[in-house]
Image (cartoon, rainbow, N blue to C red):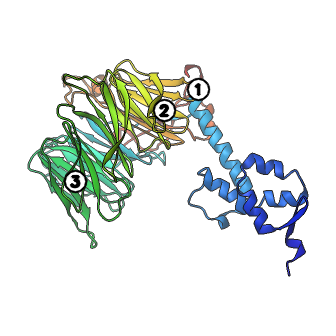
Amino acid sequence: IRNEMDDVPFFDIQLPYELAINIFQYLDRKDLGRCAQVSKTWKVIAEDEVLWYRLCRQEGHLPESSISDYSCWKLIFQECRAKEHMLRTNWKNRRGAVSELEHVPDAVLCDVHSHDGVVIAGYTSGDVRVWDTRTWDYTAPFLDSEYEEDEPGMQPYVSFVRINSSLAVAAYEDGFLNIWDLRTGKYPIHRFEHDARIQALALSQEDATVATASAFDVVMLRPNDEGYWQIAAEFEVQKLVDYLEIVPDTGRYPVAVATAGDLVYLLKAEDSARTLHYVYGQPVTCLDVSANQAAFGVKSLGWVYEGNKILVYSLEAERCLSKLGNALGDFTCVNLRDSPPNLMVSGNMDRRVRIHDFRTDKIALSLSAHQLGVSAVQMDDWKIVSGGEEGLVSVWDYRMNQKLWEVHSRHPVRHLSFNSHSLITANVPYERVVRNTDLDFTAHRRHRGLIHAYEFAVDRLALQSTLPVCRSSADPTAGHGYALALAFPQDRS
């Protein structure tokens, strides 16, 4: 016999509480608020923990939490939305703190990469350095290589650096590769040697898989079940590799996509190299991959000029899904992995940033963004951050078709990465030589490149302060790192 106390009046019928909850789960927060005003009984249902916990999960708040972690999920939901609104306001008005990550003396920046606020940089001195910007503690450790200590400054240049949540990887001009475990210390856990210069380097964002391309070989490295690093797969390609990316979430067997001139390869660990795309004389100009797709720019050349395009391929079906854009300039960067569903953002030598919509195979928005070619770009559900060859970093609210603010540095923007509350940018010089070595450090530091960390979720004192505030107790002369936090000027937004 049903307990009458568990029944809920739904106008002219009585429903069990569980069934009422199942109906209310289809309502959004505004509808739940309206329902809560109907009656006391409806108010109890509309404020049920299960409904608000589900809303938090749907909007991406506290994704790792379980329903038992908090006692009032409606309040948690409201607090998360308020924090999200504050962050968005700070982004729009350029309110926050910016830090310049200290440079290695007498060295030029070669490559920069970041993951979840942790930044890695490689230099012409052979030094590799890591900062954790999430803690505002910029005492940055050096990752040691295994070169002899009695040959200071004689290490080869760093060609590429990559980082994920647990590993740091650096490739050097002499074909060596160092892999460090960020959790165990500053000495390499594995060292690999190629016979020739490493042309491209990729590191999985999800697991311990590294891919390198040297001469006509692509090698995938990963640890075995005992933790010893080994070659998981090796492929032979026909031309020198230009771009290399590891496909995320492929399980036990790693998968990579490589471009070499006008060839695009799909590299599966249990298979030989497969040609994903090939049109003679039409080289690939940029590449990005997601879990099931690859997007790359193609330069149109030859008798039949079709305009430069971005092709989107299904990695499972190994066929072209979309041909996007029709630009005069070369596509120089494309970001598929970080873009919202059904959208993708690209940068072009024609100085424009474009949003592509997969649902219509058309350009949803085109922004005249830079004075020279676009070199780096990323978008989320409301904004775009783009970097240019002239050194400009621009932030856009693309729904309003409005530039919010910009920052300029001397060298091309070679890396940018942002999340809801922080932004990492790196300006890397074209030339890796400081021509006039007689100048002192302060005079020619402009030749060396810059890395900036922006934080928009800072405490109120930092937001209201207009004076430089030192946020680190590290001695800047000690050769480690220091941070300078500034409130962005209000009148420059």
Looking at the picture, how far across and down is residue 264, in whole percent?
23, 43
- The image quadrant that residue 427 belongs to is top left
Identify the residue position indicated by label 2 in the image: 384
Residue named by callout 1: 400
Left or right: 261 with respect to 290?
Answer: left
> Along the line of sight, which residue is nearer the eye, 372 or 430?
372
Farthest residue, direction left: 195
The Cα atoms of the two marked residues, 3 and 2, are separated by 34 Å
Q: Are marks 3 and 2 in contact (CB under 8 Å)?
A: no
Question: What is the secondary structure assignment of the residue under circle 1?
Answer: loop
Q: Which residue is mark 3?
A: 178
Alpha-carbon span between mark 2 and mark 1: 11 Å
User: Taking the image as drawn, is residue 254 in sight?
Assistant: yes
The answer to which of marks 3 and 2 sits earlier in the sequence is 3
Foreground pick, 484 / 191: 191
Quadrant location of the N terminus in the rendered image:
bottom right
Dot 3 crowding, Cα within 10 Å, few <14, some 14–19, many 20+: many
Instruction: Determine whether label 3 and label 1 are within 8 Å by CB.
Output: no
When asked about the image quadrant of residue 260, the answer is top left
On screen, residue 108 above or below 67:
above
Which mark's residue is nearer the viewer, 3 or 1? 1
